[in-house]
Amino acid sequence: MWRLIAGAVMISFSAVFVELVSVPPATSAFYRVLFGGLILLGIVLWRREPLRFRPGALALLALAALFFALDLSVWHRSILFVGPGVATLLANFQVFVLATAGVIVFRERLTWFQVVSIPLAIFGLVLLVGFDWSSFSAGYKTGVILGLLTAACYAGYLLSLRQVRAAEAGGSSFATITVVSLVTAALLALAMWPEHASFVIPSWKDAGWLVCYGVFGQVLGWVLISSGIHKVRASQVGLILLLQPVCAFVWDVSIFGRRFTAVEIAGALLALAAIYLGSVRRAFKPAA
């Protein structure tokens, strides 16, 4: 479980690097997975690890890359309509998708703590990020729909990745994320090409931040998550990864000097408490 927690903290820095670079969100997403994938490829070659996977695992890796490319692409478009805070909140509705998949697909039994903690965590995130319902224009509604689609794609990515690691179908965590990263980069490049999106990196400073983005958001974050995701119940995975938006809020306050309210602090604490409750393994046993 600690690997998922550490991975969630690592990818929470993603918003920091997106804020620091002066390239469009789609471009930063592309270079995140490209640079991260190339760094991972170098690590795999240095460690002399094989990049061999069973056919079924390769199909799941391709599916994971497709979901991840859709996740990044749709999420960045959601940001244009509703802003990064609400877009991140909506993306983390993946917790409901994963909890449902855990019960229906993997026959997991939710604990009472999880039943309570999932809506509690979402309520905490709503307090943390805020949700200005009065601004629900047509564009805002589009952003909300895109944000919820992001949650579905994010859940699909996590479930595909979890199945690859659970099957132990060849390849280490480094090899797994290397393949996913490079295939995702290729898919994002194909999506950017008809839109005439720019691949230009304006300065060496931007290049440095994009490399850091790849290291934290892709190498450290997703290798840690990949190495631990198959050891944790699907319903718990979604809850633990809610640390990402909570930590992103902390970095926004501590690094960029964002002002915060008592309600936002209460939301962060509530979300953290809910995540802790959801990680408790005590199962509910019906009375005889």
Image: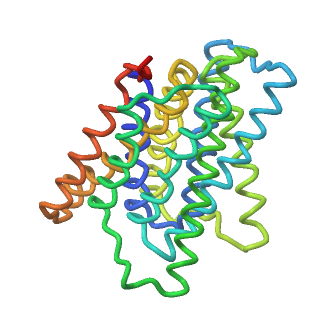
Colour mapping:
rainbow
Q: Which residue is more in the foreground, 2 or 12?
A: 2
**x 24%, y 50%: residue:** 268
How many labels sit on residues?
0
Establish if 218 lies above or below 55: below
Q: Which residue is more in the foreground, 31 or 146?
A: 146
Establish if 181 lies above or below 194: above
**x 49%, y 52%: residue:** 93
Q: Quadrant of the C terminus?
A: top left
Q: Residue furthest bottom?
A: 137
Question: Toward which corner of the image does residue 175 lie, by quadrant?
Answer: top right
Q: Which residue is more in the foreground, 25 or 85?
A: 85
**x 33%, y 36%: residue:** 275
Q: Quadrant of the N terminus?
A: top left
**x 36%, y 37%: residue:** 9
Q: Position of residue 8 (x, y in %)?
A: 41, 37
11 left or right of 168 in image: left
132 left or right of 83 in image: left
Q: Residue furthest front?
A: 288
Q: Residue furthest left?
A: 262
Q: Position of residue 231 (x, y in %)?
A: 53, 18
Question: Toward which corner of the image does residue 143 lie, by quadrant?
Answer: bottom right
Q: Position of residue 97 (x, y in %)?
A: 57, 45
Q: Which residue is more in the foreground, 260 or 171?
A: 260
